[in-house]
Image (spheres, helix red, strand yellow):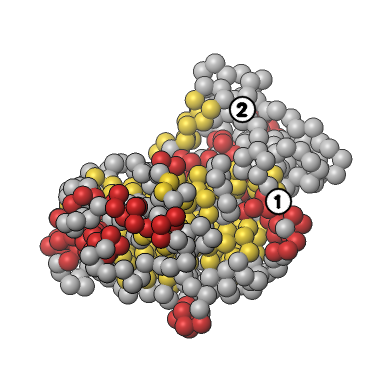
Amino acid sequence: MIACSAGAVCGFAAAGRPRPGAQALSLALWQELGPDVTQTYFDRTGTEQDNTYFSPTGATAVARLVAREPLPPGCSRRTACGGWTRRSRRRGSPGPRPPRNTPDHEQESRTMNVRVWHEHGRRVGVLAGCTALVLTLAGTAAQAHTPGHHDPARRTLPAGDGWASYGSGTTGGAAADAAHVRTVTDWAQFTAALAEGGDAPRIIKVKGTIDAVAGGCDAFAVPGYDFDAYLETYAPETWGLERDLTDEPDDSPEGLRRASAARQNAVIKVNVPSHTTIIGVGRDAAIKGASLQIKEVDNVVVRNLTLESPVDCFPQWDPTDGDRGNWNSEYDTVVVHGSTHVWLDHNTFTDGAHPDSAAPTHFGMLYQQHDGELDIVKGADYVTASWNVFTEHDKTILIGNSDSESTAVGDRGKLKATFHHNLFTHLTERTPRVRFGQVDVYNNHFVAGSGYGYSFGVGKESQLVAEHNAFTLPEGVSPAKVLKRWNDSPLTARHNLVNGRPVDLIAVHNAEIPEETLRSGAGWTPTLRKTVHPAWAVPALVRLGAGAGRLR
């Protein structure tokens, strides 16, 4: 096998010389090589970067793919963008010294750097200047295509792409006739398009920004509701912390809050039927303030949308929640409730203009107006979430919503989900938190912020597999925080990087938090994966390819 420093931005070389860094590999190139000719082994000698090894076949393939182009203007063999930067071999570094004076070596001497890569005649990457690569993503397996269709709205989930491809697969509304294809530009048109047509396949194209709460929170408030009166009535020093508000009458501040909340609930929750594709048009399609309910249906696709979390206009104060009471809110952005075959792809989930960081405090507690970004609950099954961005949120993804035995009866053997090539950035927790399901989490990038709590919540009877992911943690945050044990359920966590270095997440967790020891071995092996990239390549690939507006 042939060694390479993943930190170098160097030219592509053939067998026996340094390989390009992660930022110098386009997604299209990785897809062309495929996992069969590339492998990653991590340097165990303490160097700052991991070592990547290509098989001889893979090394030769890289060289031949990229030797077609000259050096960029202004670059030379000795700069960061041209030639090679030899990495000194340390004692114990894996891999043999490569042979010299071979055909591959001669090919390497002609391969300095790459200005443009082509795949099937299409530009897939550009080297800007001598140190930065600007990559575009095109013609890859990550972009699902339905044969014979160039319309993204009729693309379907490829076979083998996560749990949503299991069995009958996920096609959404790809088979819709012309009468069931609608382009919508406001909330009324959107809800009408969802309601009409029964279970016939449908495609709903969202153009521009649709706002479910365009009239603001005041539009939902019933006569007599007064938030200041609510605060005055239920202040801990007045009401105390021993009684909840369940028995408050309809004409009380809590009763008026309940009535106002019911109005909002009726407007912003919308049911998505079976055999539906909802897709954003262009780069700026968005739905604000809505809760998409994918409930007791099959075969749904949601793609290329910025989904701004709904704001609960009327959170409830619960004096008995915790030692100090707490504010509780409703409305998840997307709820997959008892449904099967759901594909969520190239979306951006965000709190948008209403981040928790800007929320006020009342009674000494955060005035929480958000619930989750994605819930997969109540026996839902076969879900794939790919190439999404989840950002600026607290309780992000919940898989299975209760430990109770009555819930477990419907969840055991279900809640199977795949998460790949997603960016999780500046989130607090639950990416995801798992109960019961076989959940495969691979090739994702997790970027923690100052309020980081944990990434993976290991819950009751969960069977989590987390492999080939990259974590970027701020200084002072230990990798031990990546895992959180809620229940004694074994998991598999392998080939993950933290700040560019290989880390055994289970071992470091157990070493630092021995009172919450985790066991290794989820008890199953994922097989529904299209392409698995090395963890060091994931941040660049996800940064360039994930989120709304990046469909090709």
- Rendering coords of residue 221 (x, y %): 21, 55
Crowd rating for badge 2 (residues with CA inside 10 Å; few <14, some 14–19, many 20+):
many
The residue located at (29%, 53%) in the rendering is 229
Q: How many marks?
A: 2
The residue located at (45%, 61%) in the rendering is 240
The amino acid pointed to by label 2 is Met
Q: Nearer the viewer, mark 2 or mark 1?
A: 1
The front one of 270 and 536 is 270
Kindly state the secondary structure of the residue where label 1 is placed.
loop
Q: Which residue is mark 1?
A: 503
- Rendering coords of residue 369 (x, y %): 37, 52
User: Which label number is shown at residue 335?
Assistant: none
Vertical comparison of 450 with 204: above or below:
above
Q: Earlier in the sequence, mark 2 or mark 1?
A: 2
Q: Where on the picture, by quarter, is residue 46?
A: top right
The residue located at (38%, 62%) in the rendering is 343
Q: Is residue 302 left or right of residue 476?
A: left
Q: Which residue is mark 2?
A: 112
The amino acid pointed to by label 1 is Val
- Rendering coords of residue 15 (x, y %): 70, 40
The front one of 154 and 478 is 478
